[in-house]
Each structure stands twice: as C-alpha cells, then as structure tokens.
Image (cartoon, helix red, strand yellow):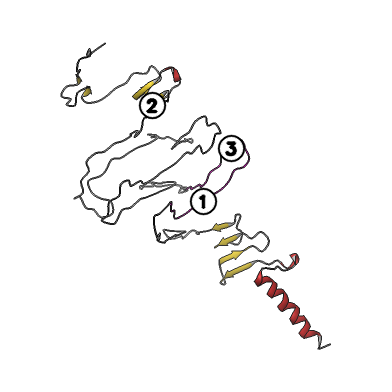
Amino acid sequence: MAWLVPHKRLIQIFFFFLFFVGGAFPASAAKDYNIKNDTESFLFVNGTSGNVGIATTAPVGKLEVSGGIAASSRIVNINGSFADLGGSRTGLYVDVTAPVVGAFGASGSWSQVRTTAAAGTYSSAITGAYTEAMHEGASTVSDLMGLMTLANQLNAGPVTNAYGIFPQIWKGTGTVTNAYGMYFQGVPDANGDTGLTTGTLLNQYGLGIGHLTTGTTRNIALLLDDDTLGSAITGDFGILQEDTAPNAFGGNIGIGPTQVDAQLALHSTGDPLID
C-alpha cells in the first residue's frame, strides 16, 4: 500500500494550492490561526467568522484590539504622511450605513474612557475623545480647527433638528458641582507644548456665528431655551432668552457705544436712546 502515500500528499498539496490561490478548504476544515508565544496571543484569526483579534482570542467584531492592563500611552497608533492635499484626506476613515429606521441612534464612531478607581482623585482631565490640529511649519494656515463636525442633509428627506454639536451631561447618585454644555478656557499666554510666550493673539471669541442665513425665521448666537415663547419671536438676536427669568451682567454694559466707561452706557446716532 506504499503507493497510496504519494497520492495522499498530492491531495494535500492540491488543497493547499486551492487555499492560496483563492479556493477554500471544505467547511469541516476551517481552522483558527493564532500567532502567540507560550503565554499570550499576538494575532488571532477566527477561521469561522473571519474576525481578527490583536492580543485577544475572542474578537467580537471584524477587528478587536485589547491593550491589556499595562497598555502603553497608545494602544493603536496610526502614523503616515499624505502625498498631497488635493482633496479630503483623513488618518482614520469610518464609513457605516444605516439602511433601516429604528428607535435608537447610529454612531459612526464611539470612544469611551471609564474611571474605575475606588478612592483618590483623578487630578488631570478625563476626556472621552481628544482631537488636535497642530501646525508645525512656517507656512500660513487659513483655518486651524481642533474639531470639525458636520450634520449634512444630503437629499430631500426632512430633518426636524440638526445639531453641529450636541453635548450631553448625565449625573449619577453623587454631586456634580458645575455642568458646562460648552466651555472655552481661553488662549493661555504660554504654549502648552513649547512653553513659549512670544506669539500674538489679536482676537478671541467664546462663541460666534459666521453667517446669518437668509430666509430663516431666526438667527440667534446664544439661545436660552425654556420653551416659554418658542418660535413666536422672530428676527436676528445676539442673545435670546425664551423664559421670564432675570438676567445679571457683571462689569460695565454698553449698548451702541464702542467705549464703555460706565455701568450702563447708551449711545444713539439719531434714534431714541430708550423707546
């Protein structure tokens, strides 16, 4: 029966050939692939689902990365250079489709940091997502944006509310001292990376609207929304408060003048100062 040995080897070679040129083993021959040492897995491929795991042998998605309890400062590091900027370029691109409606939202990306220490104080900021646009060269950048978001109504489907940014803050059973929907700390004198103080800042804005859209009912820079008056008020406003709560402003207040040297300064170029 020695003549069977070469034939068995030919059959094995045939199946290996099919595998490498795009064929497949029979379903019963599907195997996992694991690159590992004696104690841990480095790269794992599930032979049934095709899921890939880095440092895990149980990937639940097409790619799962486990940094472990002693992860370095970067669990996943993407580093490269764009050959040109002739169009949109991105270091990480996520494209998912939601072809059916539902009661819950869809997210292109989700990032979460959990703080689990039972005692002590986290003295530095904890952030769910951090983005940075860094200009290192000597060329001119017209617009440098740490974060840009876009809510895009591409076709004719109606949109009830469109939000460029929609921050939310939830409280648990403890105390939240201050909750800020948005907070701009202001530009510091010294650069946080270099420590240099030689740069010049000409103008600083906490919140601005760059374009008043024509044909809209209202253009409002800051809306204090308590749904008391709602859309009954129309027009363009720097600040609109929709309830009857009082307002308090510290320091001098100017209406009309460019120089405010009193607690309340009014200036008119022909119209009544108070009407």
Which residue is denoted by mark 3 in the rendering? 104
Above/below status of 255 relative to 111: above
Q: Position of residue 234 (x, y in %)?
A: 40, 19
Disc number lying in front (2 or 3)? 2
**Would residue 148 be visible to someone looking at this image?**
yes
Badge 3 amino acid: Phe
Above/below status of 55 relative to 251: below
Tell me which numbered mark, 2 or 1, is placed earlier along the sequence.
1
Position of 202 with respect to 184 (left or right) is left
Q: Which mark is residue 219?
A: 2
Above/below status of 10 relative to 179: below
Helix, strand or loop at label 1? It is loop
Q: Which mark is residue 116?
A: none
Which residue is denoted by mark 1 in the rendering? 94
Helix, strand or loop at label 3? It is loop
Residue lying farthest right? 1
Q: Residues within 10 Å of mark 3 (few under 14, many from 20)?
A: few
Quarter of the picture holding the N terminus: bottom right
Residue lying farthest left? 261
Is 188 one of the magenta-colored residues? no
Residue lying farthest top? 275
Q: Which residues are magenta?
A: 88-112
The picture quadrant where one finds residue 188 is top left
